[in-house]
Image: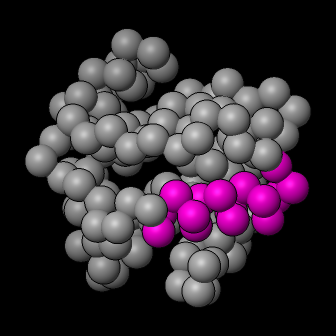
Amino acid sequence: MIEFHFNTDFSLENPEKYSRWLEQLIESEQGSLEQLDYIFCSDEELLDMNQKYLSHDTYTDILTFDYTEDKAIAGDIFISVDRVRDNAQDLNTEFEEELRRVMAHGVLHLFGYKDKTDEEASLMRTKEEEKMAMFHVEQ
């Protein structure tokens, strides 16, 4: 099951389409869906979590809490809507496109993809692009 939670005034347009896309994304990596929760929040809420759980005193666009076993995907994915907006502006891209990139990024982490090294980040970016393209395929 995929659930969306909104701790800000933001909401997804057509959440069913996002759910179908995420289900396809998971299937494309030969995974199965257990429970996936997206929590959309503010910069301040995510900063607080970053400090509390990771001892990082920086803003971030996403924090992923992984409860996956084998390829049975389960996790909580917290996304800062503020940071996604800022990143979209900095990258000269649409907010919705950057949002999908971050949403895919979180699921890819649940599959074990990393982004700490240049090589890992390059593979992650390739996978993000691949998964984002699936959003526009008729479902």
Q: Is residue 135 left or right of residue 70?
A: left
The outermost residue toward the top is 52
| Residue drawn 53% across the image and 85% down it | 136
| Residue drawn 68% across the image and 63% down it | 25
| Residue drawn 72% across the image and 55% down it | 26
Q: Quadrant of residue 3?
A: top left
Q: Position of residue 70 (x, y in %)?
A: 87, 33
Q: Is residue 1 left or right of residue 58?
A: right
| Residue drawn 55% across the image and 76% down it | 135
Residue 56 magenta: no
Q: Is residue 89 left or right of residue 112?
A: left
Residue 23 magenta: yes
Q: Quadrant of residue 87?
A: bottom left
When the figure is inspected, residue 37 is found, relative to residue 113, above or below; the finding is: above
Give the camera-side residue of 2 and 123: 2
Give the camera-side residue of 85 and 107: 107
Q: Position of residue 56 (x, y in %)?
A: 41, 24
Q: Report the magenta stretch's main SS.
A: helix
When the figure is inspected, residue 103 is found, relative to residue 110, above or below; the finding is: below
Q: Position of residue 33 (x, y in %)?
A: 71, 43
